Image: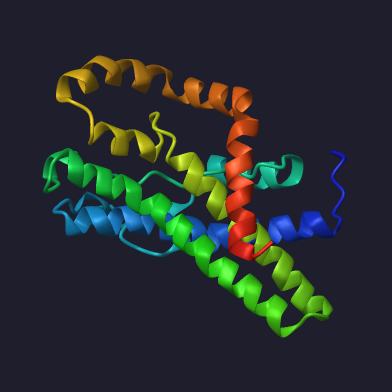
Amino acid sequence: MFGITLDSETVYRLAAVAIFLLVGFPVHEFAHAWTANRLGDGTARLFGRLSLNPAVHFDPLGAGVLALSALFSPFIIGWAKPTPVNPVNLRGGRTGEAWVAAAGPLTNLAMAVVGGLVFRAIIAMQPEYSQLAAFVVNVTYYFVAINVILFVFNFIPVPPLDGSKVLFAFLPPRLIWQIHQALDQWGLLIVIVLLVVAGQLIAGPVYALIDFLVGF
């Protein structure tokens, strides 16, 4: 009806998306919540977000974009429900806020590394692997790819992405005040323009890191 063909690559991508919704997003958001809680802000815990339960982190729009990008785009992207954080409660001020922001993308990198090790192990153990092993290998590859893409994407230093809070930790307060309002208002549009204009520039390092992790 919509021109979707469920070939093997599409099945691998959708299976990786399903795993990511159950594992990847919950781990990412839990990392934000756990780090904030450790640094003195229990807001996420009070809202029930200090949890690995996929349901509490599920965002229908973000999940839909993830699935659609897996079907129609070479660049898989999506998001979960943002973790509530009150920066006023955090120890360390802007540095604490930066650690909370960085925790999510860093878990994506960690999951990509683990996925890459699993990928390499299966390849090493089964050079002529079965159909099941082939399925696991390909799904693992896409799981690694999604994590690497979100790791790089989230560190773009533009609101509402995590990288903006990391950037603000290193800028003078006066400069932050000057640019914060503009970035908050136009940040999402800037991100979209960056992806359209500089997508190929971003894609190069992204796929180089994916290939490094899986051993290509």
What residue appears at the point 43 percent right and 45 percent down from the top-left corner? 81
Q: Is residue 138 left or right of residue 56?
A: right
Q: Is residue 202 left or right of residue 35?
A: right
What residue appears at the point 34 percent right and 48 percent down from the top-left corner? 102
Give above or below for 216 relative to 125: above
Q: How many marks?
A: 0
- Residue 55 can be seen in this image: no
Expressed as whole percent of the image width and height from the top left, the position of residue 28 reads 42, 55
Question: How is the protein colored in the picture?
Answer: rainbow
Expressed as whole percent of the image width and height from the top left, the position of residue 134 reads 78, 73
Q: Is residue 69 left or right of residue 29?
A: right
Q: From the viewer's side, name the closer residue of 45 and 125.
A: 125
Which quarter of the rendered picture does the C terminus lie within? bottom right
Give above or below for 181 relative to 213: above
Expressed as whole percent of the image width and height from the top left, the position of residue 77 reads 59, 43
What residue appears at the point 70 percent right and 56 percent down from the top-left corner? 14
User: Residue 12's image quarter?
Assistant: bottom right
User: Residue 52's image quarter?
Assistant: bottom left
- Residue 30 can be seen in this image: yes
Q: From the viewer's side, name the closer residue of 94 and 24.
A: 94
Farthest residue toward the bottom? 125
Expressed as whole percent of the image width and height from the top left, the position of residue 83 reads 34, 47
What residue appears at the point 34 percent right and 33 percent down from the top-left corner? 164
Which quarter of the rendered picture does the N terminus lie within? top right
Q: Is residue 49 left or right of residue 125?
A: left
